[in-house]
Amino acid sequence: MKPLVKRLLLFIFVPLLLSLLLVAFMPKETAMRTYEVFGVKIAKNPPQSKLTELGVSTWPKWEGGPTKIPWSFDAEETMYLLEGKVRVTVEGSVGTFEIGAGDLVVFPKGMNITWEVIEAVKKHYSLKK
């Protein structure tokens, strides 16, 4: 084998192959992406272990069809959306954001929003005491 080909294999193809294997076998739990919008914390696709740790399945449920509701949070509220899609407008902010099925969301106490259900929602929720 020519020296140039050996170098290409060693420095390009081997690391590329290893990184592809790493991605292919990476546990799905590492796929959770967390970010904050207007003070609202959103975790996309949290792992089942996180939902179990929080006791999400024991939280009360709420369901609602398409509607637009002004809402004020009297306590910090954590919710896990099972189904649907919601557009959220935070009072005093410019712009909106959307949350939907598979999102674990924390709204801080005292926040005022407009909650616009775009697709019928089913969610579990917990109020911080």
Image: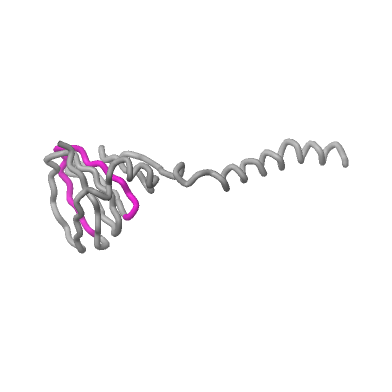
Span colored in magenta: 101-117
Q: Position of residue 114 (x, y in %)?
A: 17, 50
Name the residue rendered at 22%, 58% in the picture.
Answer: 117
Residue at the extreme right? 1
Q: Is residue 109 magenta?
A: yes
Residue 122 lies left or right of residue 14; in this view the side is left
User: Is residue 27 located in the magenta-colored stretch of the structure?
Assistant: no
Q: Position of residue 109 (x, y in %)?
A: 16, 37
x, y percentage for residue 64?
19, 60
Q: Residue at x 83, y 38 (%)?
A: 4
* 60 on left or right of 36: left
Nearest the viewer among 94 and 29 is 29
Query: How are the colours assigned in the image?
Result: one colour
What is the quadrant of the N terminus in the image? top right
* Prevailing secondary structure class for the magenta stretch in the rendered image: strand
Q: Using the image, determine if residue 117 lies above or below residue 19.
A: below
Q: Quadrant of residue 75?
A: top left
The residue located at (29%, 41%) in the rendering is 54
Which quadrant of the rendered structure holds the C terminus? top left
Q: How many marks?
A: 0
Which residue occupies the foreground of this view, 52 or 70? 52
Foreground residue among 29 and 41: 29
The residue shown at (22%, 48%) is 59
The picture places residue 31, in percent across and down from the top left corner, at 45, 45
